[in-house]
């Protein structure tokens, strides 16, 4: 550490591999699919793509030779010296998360990549070391964590004891092995494949392959005509058995796809961080600092509610990066009860309360049910104008309008009966949603801003709405409407007591 060094030489091989992978389809299209075309765009395109490929290939060793980095005591420095010398300094205090990823290339050479995600915004929000040894990545993470712990200790000491910092301050050296909280079973994988509808993706793929196969071997015959002939010739029970077999094969194929995506998923944590490992052929490990967690939300779609599963999302301060948007998502198909108990295991200060308040009846009778639905009105106007012909059936357009109206009413009824709210010591809990639900949990000290609003009808009924915002990118807003004004005022006083 604290010495300037070059990147690992295998970085050049990795860059060449990425170059070939990124330009493969261009070469395939220009030199194989359109190899015999004399059109000027393809002719000059082949020349341009070869020239670009050679220039980038030449630049790879030059970039490696002129680039160095230094893991300093307080910051990370990235230097490049060519015609113009550039230097970038990343203070360890701005690093929010770390992420390791081991692609097939990394696993073949026993290497890994390490991404440091900072609290800054823009294109420079992340720093990625594409090729590191396992030891180098581990030492870099350990050094960053130790430096941040030392800074926190010094800041706490200076607040409590102004003056010179004692030499006896020690960093946090708690290095116990992470506790594994969840790893999916075969039954969890099966439910995940159903909830993700991955088996549905099999049907268009199979249809496309069969259509091309039939056209190639049947002299241009259309797949629809072939299947029509089959339906006319086969008995009904053979068709029924065939459909059942196709559905079972699709579910099996969807389960295999889910295994490749979530088969080796693991959620673990220690005293400081949360570790999320995923991927079958390419292993990726996210590390989320518990100190950066601003709130927790549990999401359930209608299909997840039917299967008794849920998804936990961690709302974190700082940028989580655009390369992997799932960095703050835990396993998206957790058993619902396990999801709530896992919150308390991973974040002991977030205790879930089962007893919650319900919305007052006037919020449902006078506001929820009588509020105009713009979705229904716009949909009705479009249906009247278009008058759709659904699958050739002679169904009046207004039937669809009535169906949409019923869905709107059902959603509002579900919203009223499912919305809950409560405050427990330093924790606020809010549950909202109709067909899909969201459970929000945040500590008082993590709430950045609280808004209380009332329109004229709410004033007459003694109701109000609150909006809670938490630091994230973008800022997360959680809104709940039509609460009793007395509870909202108590909640506002509770919020002002935060330290």
Image: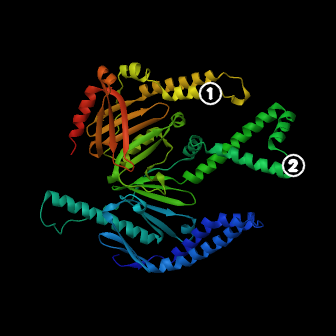
Q: Is residue 383 left or right of residue 163?
A: right
Identify the residue at image location x=38%, y=69%.
140
Q: Is residue 105 left or right of residue 488?
A: right
Q: Depth-wise, is mark 2 or mark 1 nearer the camera?
A: 1
Residue 437 x, y percent position in the rendering: 45, 35
How far, Cα to Cα, is label 2 from label 1? 43 Å
Residue 26 x, y percent position in the rendering: 66, 65
Residue 297 x, y percent position in the rendering: 40, 42
Colour scheme shown? rainbow
Local SS, label 2 = loop
Identify the residue at image location x=81%, y=31%.
236
Identify the residue at image location x=29%, y=63%.
148
Total of numbered circles in the picture?
2
Q: Which residue is mark 2?
A: 218
Identify the residue at image location x=39%, y=34%.
431
First along the sequence among labels 2 and 1: 2
Q: Is residue 441 left or right of residue 491?
A: right
Q: Which residue is mark 1?
A: 385
Q: Is residue 9 left or right of residue 70?
A: right
Is 462 located above or below residue 116 in the figure? above
């Amino acid at each position: 550490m604290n010495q300037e060094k070059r990147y690992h030489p295998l970085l050049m091989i990795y860059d060449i591999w990425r170059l070939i992978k990124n330009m493969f389809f261009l070469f395939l299209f220009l030199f194989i699919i359109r190899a015999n075309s004399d059109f000027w765009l393809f002719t000059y395109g082949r020349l341009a793509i070869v020239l670009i490929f050679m220039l980038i290939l030449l630049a790879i060793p030059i970039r490696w030779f002129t680039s160095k980095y230094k893991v300093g005591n307080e910051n990370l420095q990235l230097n490049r010296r060519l015609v113009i010398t550039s230097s970038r300094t990343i203070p360890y205090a701005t690093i929010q998360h770390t992420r390791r990823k081991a692609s097939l290339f990394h696993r073949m050479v026993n290497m890994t990549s390490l991404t440091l995600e900072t609290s800054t915004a823009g294109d420079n929000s992340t720093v990625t070391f594409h090729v590191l040894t396992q030891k180098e990545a581990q030492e870099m993470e350990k050094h960053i964590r130790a430096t941040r712990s030392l800074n926190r200790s010094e800041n706490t000491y200076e607040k409590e004891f102004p003056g010179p910092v004692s030499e006896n301050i020690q960093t946090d050296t708690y290095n116990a092995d992470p506790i594994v909280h969840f790893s999916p079973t075969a039954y969890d994988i099966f439910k995940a494949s159903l909830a993700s509808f991955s088996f549905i993706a099999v049907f268009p793929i199979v249809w496309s392959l069969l259509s091309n196969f039939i056209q190639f071997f049947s002299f241009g015959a259309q797949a629809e005509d072939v299947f029509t002939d089959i339906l006319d010739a086969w008995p009904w029970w053979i068709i029924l058995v065939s459909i059942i077999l196709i559905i079972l094969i699709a579910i099996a194929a969807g389960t295999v796809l889910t295994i490749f995506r979530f088969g080796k998923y693991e959620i673990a944590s220690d005293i400081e961080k949360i570790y999320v490992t995923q991927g079958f052929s390419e292993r990726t490990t996210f590390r989320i600092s518990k100190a950066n967690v601003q709130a927790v939300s549990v999401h359930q779609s209608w299909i997840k509610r039917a299967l008794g599963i849920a998804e936990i999302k961690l709302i974190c301060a700082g940028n989580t990066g655009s390369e992997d948007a799932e960095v703050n998502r835990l396993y998206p198909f957790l058993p619902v009860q396990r999801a709530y108990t896992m919150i308390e295991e991973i974040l002991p200060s977030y205790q879930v309360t089962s007893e919650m308040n319900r919305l007052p009846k006037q919020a449902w009778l006078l506001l929820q049910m009588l509020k105009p639905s713009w979705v229904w009105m716009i949909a009705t106007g479009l249906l009247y104008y278009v008058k759709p012909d659904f699958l050739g059936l002679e169904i009046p357009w207004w039937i669809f309008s009535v169906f949409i109206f019923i869905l709107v009413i059902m959603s509002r009824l579900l919203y009223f009966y499912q919305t809950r709210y409560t405050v427990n010591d330093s924790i606020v809990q809010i549950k909202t949603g109709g067909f899909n639900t969201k459970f929000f949990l945040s500590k008082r000290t993590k709430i950045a801003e609280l808004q209380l609003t009332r329109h004229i009808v709410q004033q007459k009924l003694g109701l109000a709405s609150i909006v809670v915002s938490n630091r994230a990118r973008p800022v997360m807003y959680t809104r709940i409407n039509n609460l009793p004004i007395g509870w909202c005022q108590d909640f506002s006083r509770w919020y002002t007591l935060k330290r």
